[in-house]
Image (tube, rainbow, N blue to C red):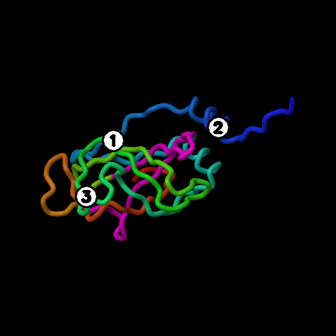
């Protein structure tokens, strides 16, 4: 019987994910996250995926709110997706992370990517706009940040600012 050919990415993902663990995010007095180093496992996964700190791509910030503009986000978990390819990650790849709305800008950090066909990897990326942050619009309230639209620029990072 011929041997089945396997793809190395799922095995690498399993090895990387076994070593990764959750770390708590340090918060500033205004409730926004403080600086945080990207875990080595995520940096290794990003290199393997052909994604380098500084790489950028257009993303839909929150899948469940696609098409809403302006976009109201509440503190907590979120799921977005890539609009275009990034390294070996195809358009449609899901992004998982967290949003904070405590300061003058909304802060979004993605810490995991999942291929459309399956397979997940640790990741470090932030959402920025042309000015570098996602400034809140008038009408934002405690725990809810309103930003311009449902699209943003994902920037891969080696450390969260």
x and y percentages locating residue 157 in the rendered image? 49, 54
**In terms of sequence position, does the residue under pointer 1 or pointer 3 come before the other?**
3
x and y percentages locating residue 147 in the rendered image? 25, 61
> Is 40 on the left or on the right of 138, as rendered?
right
Q: Which residues are magenta?
A: 108-135
- Which residue position is annotated with label 3? 71
Label 1 to label 3: alpha-carbon separation: 15 Å
Mark 1 packing: few (<14 Cα in 10 Å), some, or many (20+)? some
x and y percentages locating residue 151 in the rendered image? 36, 62
**In terms of sequence position, does the residue under pointer 2 or pointer 1 come before the other?**
2
* Residue 109 forms part of the magenta stretch: yes
Residue drawn at x 30%, y 52% is 65
Which residue appears farthest toward the right when viewing the image? 1
Q: Secondary structure at mark 3?
A: strand
- Which residue position is annotated with label 1? 77
* Residue 55 forms part of the magenta stretch: no
Q: Nearer the viewer, residue 57 or 30?
A: 57
> Is 137 on the left or on the right of 150, as rendered?
left
- Which residue position is annotated with label 2? 10
């Amino acid at each position: 019987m011929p041997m089945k050919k396997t793809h190395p990415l799922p095995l690498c993902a399993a090895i990387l994910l076994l070593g990764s663990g959750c770390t708590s995010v340090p918060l500033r007095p205004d409730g926004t996250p403080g600086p945080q180093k990207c875990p080595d496992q995520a940096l290794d996964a990003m290199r393997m995926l052909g994604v380098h700190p500084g790489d950028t791509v257009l993303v839909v910030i929150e899948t469940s709110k696609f098409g809403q503009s302006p976009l109201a986000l509440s503190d907590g978990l979120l799921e977005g997706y890539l609009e275009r390819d990034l390294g070996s990650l195809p358009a449609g790849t899901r992004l998982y992370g967290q949003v904070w709305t405590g300061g003058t800008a909304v802060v979004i950090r993605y810490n995991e990517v999942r291929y459309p066909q399956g397979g997940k990897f640790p990741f470090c990326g932030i959402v920025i706009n042309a000015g570098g942050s996602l400034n809140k619009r008038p009408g934002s309230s405690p725990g809810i940040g309103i930003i311009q639209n449902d699209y943003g620029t994902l920037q891969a990072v080696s450390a969260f600012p």
